[in-house]
């Protein structure tokens, strides 16, 4: 295999820098090249994870409410806080929101999806306004079923950071509609969803909320009372999703049909925080595998969620062994032989 030689470091490194908060990024932002079939080129790509909350992340947020009779005040507070919460979280990057609610198995519904993920804030506000407090039956509710339905029923976007903001004032039946606590956790972790639970009373009285938030890397806090407190608690929970992270990697999008792509290292793993900006540098090797052209992207991934994307473009030309050149003396020899043959033919006449 032929390899292009570029003036690049061969060993990836991790650098720590301190500076003003800025968008997460990947550098260089674009790269294009022409390769022969089987030829490779290696370049460096540096992912910068900025200090503070991201501004270029792909984020899906679902608000899940206990809609039983005791939740009237809390639902009203979240409804009044919704506009501020939506406008603030929109600054995280490419953000969509969904809304769901649960009651109990004896009520008019056990779980309902009021809107799937949408980027239209007015539609999210309308869905939140649809929440109503009624029913509930006994003390435990259908929490586990509601969480499992959110995990499996929401149309989560590929590569998104997935967040559920869950608030209620009572624990859930275990099982609920056949869903156990273990089932709910498996569904949530299977979709890489972070759950932040906000207690409006006795949500964690059986330890369910603690177990679910711990298993999904989320937080457990108090919802608070009043629009201001509710806004602050929900925004703090969402911000906590990004405060620390453990894995940084690269992911190739669809379209890399003419090359193979490998990275060294495959990922950086550790305990990182956004108190400071961090740079993570990868050696990325492209190898021509199919004659033609292709355009694709490489995503910068933080804990599996896309925070930045760069574009690559390649043309791969035909390969194979080059023709062997004739020795310099061979044309003279052939000419002599041909001349000798002509001479012999003339003599036969």
Image (cartoon, rainbow, N blue to C red):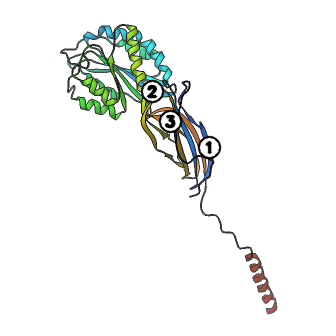
**Residue 145 appears in the rendering:** no
Give the residue number, with chain letter if any, for mark 3.
300
**Outermost residue toward the left?**
138
In the rendered structure, which disc, 1 or 2, sits on the residue that comes first in sequence? 1
Instruction: Residue 119 in the image: state x and y as whole percent.
Output: 47, 22
* Pick the front one: 176 or 30: 30
**Residue 25 appears in the rendering:** yes
Answer few, some or many: residues within 10 Å of disc 3's Cα (few below 14, many 20 plus, some between 14 and 19). Answer: many
Left or right placement of residue 170 versus residue 189 in this view: left
Could you give the CA–CA distance between mark 3 and mark 1, rounded to whole angstroms?
18 Å
Left or right placement of residue 38 versus residue 269 in this view: right
Left or right placement of residue 86 versus residue 223 in this view: right
Instruction: Residue 44 in the image: state x and y as whole percent.
Output: 57, 43
Q: Which mark is residue 59?
A: 2
* Pick the front one: 307 or 277: 277
Q: Residue at x 19, y 15 (%)?
A: 139
Please determine whether, in this image, residue 247 is positioned above or below residue 77: below
Image quarter in which the C terminus is found: bottom right
Instruction: Give the image quarter of residue 104.
Output: top left
Closest to the camera, between mark 3 and mark 1, is 3
Give the residue number, with chain letter if any, for mark 1.
32
Instruction: Give the image quarter of residue 168.
Output: top left
Instruction: Residue 263 in the image: state x and y as whole percent.
Output: 50, 45
Please determine whether, in this image, residue 238 is positioned above or below residue 135: below
Please determine whether, in this image, residue 238 is positioned above or below residue 291: above
Image quarter in which the N terminus is found: bottom right
């Amino acid at each position: 295999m032929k390899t292009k030689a570029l003036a690049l470091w061969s060993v990836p490194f991790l650098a720590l820098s301190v500076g003003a908060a800025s968008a997460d990024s990947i550098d260089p932002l674009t790269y294009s090249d022409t390769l022969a079939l089987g030829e490779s080129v290696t370049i460096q790509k540096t992912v910068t994870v900025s200090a503070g909350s991201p501004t270029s992340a792909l984020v899906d947020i679902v608000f899940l409410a206990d809609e039983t009779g005791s939740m009237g005040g809390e639902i009203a507070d979240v409804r009044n806080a919704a506009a501020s919460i939506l406008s603030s979280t929109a600054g995280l990057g490419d953000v969509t929101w969904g809304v769901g609610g649960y009651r109990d198995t004896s009520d008019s519904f056990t779980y309902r999806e009021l809107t799937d993920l949408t980027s239209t804030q007015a539609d999210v506000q309308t869905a939140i306004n649809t929440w109503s407090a009624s029913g509930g039956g006994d003390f435990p509710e259908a929490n586990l079923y509601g969480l499992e339905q959110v995990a499996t029923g929401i149309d989560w976007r590929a590569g998104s950071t997935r967040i559920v903001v869950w608030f209620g004032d009572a624990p859930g039946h275990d099982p609920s509609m056949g869903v156990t606590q273990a089932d709910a956790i498996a569904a949530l972790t299977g979709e890489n969803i972070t759950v932040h639970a906000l207690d409006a009373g006795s949500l964690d009285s059986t330890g369910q909320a603690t177990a679910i938030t711990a298993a999904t890397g989320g937080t457990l806090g108090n919802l608070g009372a009043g629009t201001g407190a509710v806004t602050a608690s929900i925004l703090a929970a969402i911000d906590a999703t990004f405060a620390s992270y453990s894995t940084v990697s690269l992911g190739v999008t669809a379209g890399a049909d003419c090359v193979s792509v490998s990275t060294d290292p495959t990922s950086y793993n550790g305990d990182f925080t956004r108190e400071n900006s961090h740079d993570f540098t990868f050696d990325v090797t492209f190898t021509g595998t199919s004659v033609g052209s292709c355009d694709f992207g490489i995503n910068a991934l933080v804990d599996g969620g896309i925070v930045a994307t760069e574009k690559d473009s390649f043309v791969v030309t035909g390969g194979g062994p080059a023709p062997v050149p004739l020795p310099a003396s061979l044309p003279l020899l052939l000419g002599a032989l041909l001349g000798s043959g002509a001479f012999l033919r003339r003599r036969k006449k």
